[in-house]
């Protein structure tokens, strides 16, 4: 490696990874970065905090496969002394006692219990539960002839499904959903809502310690890993949060694709066959988690021709890595059956087994039920009027307004 390649993150060569350009045309910008910098880019995050942005498929897999070197605990970051408490990216880096920030044997203990508790979910029962939830939501707007499919459909699906899987009493679900939505906001309601969410789930876990049931919470408590009540509470809060936006955005982005793209046309004849392909295509083109913070170098190392120092931050560029010409299916549409994308992450800290399979059952059922119930659904704006939320981190529409022939309620049928 030449001296010239050694560009500490944060020097004058670093690219500002924020601002309008990035928010509005991320895919074009990833291409430019790849041309100008290669697979690993020195960047400045909001507030000009330096980091390394990994956009090469092979390099990203290398980072994700080496958790001892590229570690997950955010307390390793070497910039903490300078970060203000109101830094906009704080929610992504603030340390939490949940399992995703644990490392090594401790992570294996916690993640193993999560995976086993999720793997016990009967896949057919999950499809039936997803059908019940989605039918119930459609009943709420089917008679109106119009709806925003994000607000009325894609957004509430994951928390409704997970509340049932966790064993939460039906009567508490509306308040839980409100707290999840409020805690994801950035106003003064966010912290109290997050505290209420934690308290509600703590009460649930304490109840399940005595009255076990066929649910994720009870299975985590009974797991041989010997999790404490605190650990189970932290990890089910994480499950709810990690399931919410990625799954609802996967559903929303797939519905958008099927409404705007003839290859995945939403017809009763053509729609069914293409739902699985549309879901997979979205993971290549509009993956819900574009970029993730991150990993922190445990010690100095080389990556993509750069020297990374101990404690430096690495941003996982999942969306850009999927577009790496080394792996990218040649033309749009040809990726429909190819599952080599990195949209669920990779390695020890990737989306845990068997979540991708479970999330796909929920997402696929959601799209299919909508097609069955509202077969003539169509966009009520022009495709190019749909707006993406300006974010480098999530890929999400601001709204998905549709129109359809008013239909009856299935429950009332
Ligand atoms: C059923 C819904 C879901 C649940 C419960 C869930 C849960 C989780 C959890 C707990 C982690 C942290 C794993 C760890 O650090 O050990 C994780 C990571 C991840 N998940 Fe999911 N997830 C869900 C859906 C999705 C979806 C739909 C996507 C995208 C298509 C996704 C993409 C990811 C990615 C990229 C990571 C790795 C983040 C990183 O690099 O740090 N997840 N997920």
Image: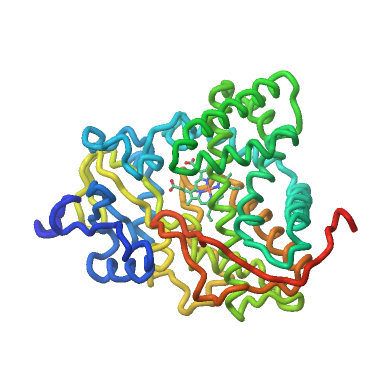
Q: Is residue 276 left or right of residue 32?
A: right
In the foreground, 395 or 103: 395
Measuring from the top left, give residue 328's x and y in whole percent: 44, 71
| The residue positioned farthest toward the left in the image shown | 3
Quarter placement of the N terminus:
bottom left
Residue 380's quadrant in the figure? bottom right
In the rendered image, residue 30, in percent from the top left (x then y), is placed at: 33, 66
**Relative to 164, 181 lies left or right:** left
Q: Residue at x 66, y 42 (%)?
A: 162
Q: Is residue 192 rendered to the left or right of residue 11?
A: right
Q: Quadrant of the C terminus?
A: bottom right
- Residue 366, above or below 225: below
Scheme of image coloration: rainbow
Q: Residue at x 34, y 51 (%)?
A: 315
Q: Nearer the viewer, residue 372 or 320?
A: 372
Total numbered circles: 0
Give the residue drawn at x 50%, y 73%: 385
- In this orientation, does residue 109 appear? no
Q: Dividing the picture into quarters, in which one does residue 338 lie?
A: bottom right
The residue closer to the viewer here, 408 or 300, is 408
């Amino acid at each position: 490696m030449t001296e010239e390649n050694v560009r500490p993150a944060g020097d004058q060569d670093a690219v500002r990874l924020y601002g309008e350009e990035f928010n509005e045309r991320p895919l074009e910008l990833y291409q430019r970065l790849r041309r100008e910098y290669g697979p690993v880019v020195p960047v400045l995050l909001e507030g000009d905090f330096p980091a390394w942005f990994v956009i090469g498929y092979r390099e990203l897999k290398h980072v994700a496969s080496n958790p001892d070197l590229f570690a997950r605990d955010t307390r390793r970051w070497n910039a903490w002394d300078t970060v203000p408490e109101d830094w906009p990216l704080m929610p992504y880096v603030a340390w939490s006692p949940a399992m995703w920030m644990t490392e090594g044997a401790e992570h294996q203990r916690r993640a193993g219990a999560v995976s086993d508790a999720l793997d016990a979910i009967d896949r057919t029962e999950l499809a039936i539960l997803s059908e019940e939830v989605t039918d119930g939501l459609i009943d709420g707007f089917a008679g109106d002839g119009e709806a925003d499919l994000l607000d009325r459909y894609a957004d509430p699906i994951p928390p409704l499904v997970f509340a049932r899987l966790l064993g939460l009493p039906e009567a508490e679900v509306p308040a839980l959903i409100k707290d999840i939505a409020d805690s994801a906001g950035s106003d003064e309601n966010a912290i109290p809502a997050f505290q209420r969410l934690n308290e509600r789930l703590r009460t649930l876990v304490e109840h399940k310690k005595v009255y076990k049931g066929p649910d994720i919470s009870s299975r985590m408590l009974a797991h041989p890993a010997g999790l404490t009540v605190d650990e189970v509470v932290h990890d089910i809060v994480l499950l709810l949060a990690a399931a919410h936006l990625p799954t609802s955005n996967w559903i929303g982005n797939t519905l958008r694709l099927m409404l705007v793209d003839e290859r995945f046309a939403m017809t009763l004849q053509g729609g069914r066959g293409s739902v699985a392909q549309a879901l997979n295509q979205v993971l290549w083109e509009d993956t819900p988690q574009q970029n993730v913070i991150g990993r922190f170098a445990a010690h100095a190392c080389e990556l993509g021709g750069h020297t990374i120092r101990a404690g430096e931050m690495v941003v996982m560029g999942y969306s850009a890595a999927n577009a790496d010409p080394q792996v990218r299916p040649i033309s749009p549409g040809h990726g429909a059956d190819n599952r080599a994308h990195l949209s669920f992450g990779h390695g020890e800290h990737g989306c845990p087994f068997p979540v991708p399979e479970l999330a796909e059952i929920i997402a696929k059922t959601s799209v299919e039920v909508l097609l069955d119930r509202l077969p003539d659904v169509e966009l009520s704006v022009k495709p190019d009027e749909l707006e993406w939320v300006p974010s480098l981190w999530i890929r999400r529409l601001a709204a998905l307004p549709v129109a359809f022939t008013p239909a009856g309620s299935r429950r009332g049928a």
